[in-house]
Image (tube, helix red, strand yellow):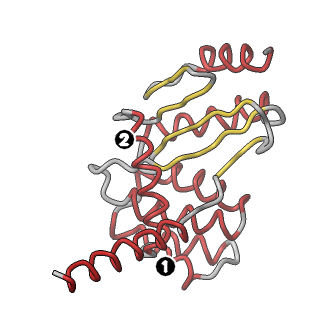
Amino acid sequence: MKKYRVKRTLTLLLAALASASAASIDVVEGNPAASVKVTIYGDLQCSYCQTLRTMLDEKLLPRYGKQVAFVHRDLPLGRHDWAHPAAMVARWVYEQSPRLGIVFQRELLDEQEHITPATLKPWVIEFAGRNKLSEQGIVVAMTDPRLSIMVDQDIQMATARGIKKIPAVYVAGQSFVETIVYDDLARVLDQALAR
């Protein structure tokens, strides 16, 4: 019994340390200090998330980027076979360079129809080489337990919010899910900024 308690205590301590070491910097576009925050749950293997990425680049960031923080959260769906390791790599790239982290997301979303579990690794290695990142580091990121915990923490937050479809966008107490209409989101952002 005593041996079990020691083992259980050690397991709990290791889990707490892993969780603390997984504390991450938020992946943010726009103005990180803004009082209006948009939380976006997405998946790098999701076509609706690609549509939202285009909306961010072409409409939302040009119009609201100086006034709003767009905070990205990972929610790789179980049916997407390479989304979880891709989210881990995206976190690692963002840690190396926030600008490249967003470029990574953008490019992977653009290429998602051509990516498979077998082609993800060569794709990220090519991305690393093209952007002067460590090829070894980017490969290690695909299986790094610390990064996996960070992604899993986002999944847990999404589960706690009851999110089942993506993208899911939250701003000023309102949610937009799956098919995001720019005019609806812009109206809510304009109202939040007017407060």
Q: Secondary structure at mark 2?
A: helix
Q: Nearer the viewer, mark 2 or mark 1?
A: 2
Q: Nearer the viewer, residue 58 or 24?
A: 24
In the displayed structure, 89 sits above or below 102; it is below
Q: Quadrant of residue 127?
A: bottom right
Residue at 47% x, 50% y is 154
Q: Provide the residue designation for mark 1.
A: 139
Residue at 79% x, 36% y is 34
Residue 181: % across, % down: 55, 19
Residue 90: % across, % down: 55, 61
Q: Nearer the viewer, residue 169 or 8?
A: 8
Looking at the rendered structure, the kind of residue marked 2 is Thr
Please identify the residue farthest to the front as the structure is shown.
2
Residue 145: % across, % down: 43, 73
Looking at the rendered structure, the kind of residue marked 1 is Val
> Is 9 on the left or on the right of 134, as rendered?
left
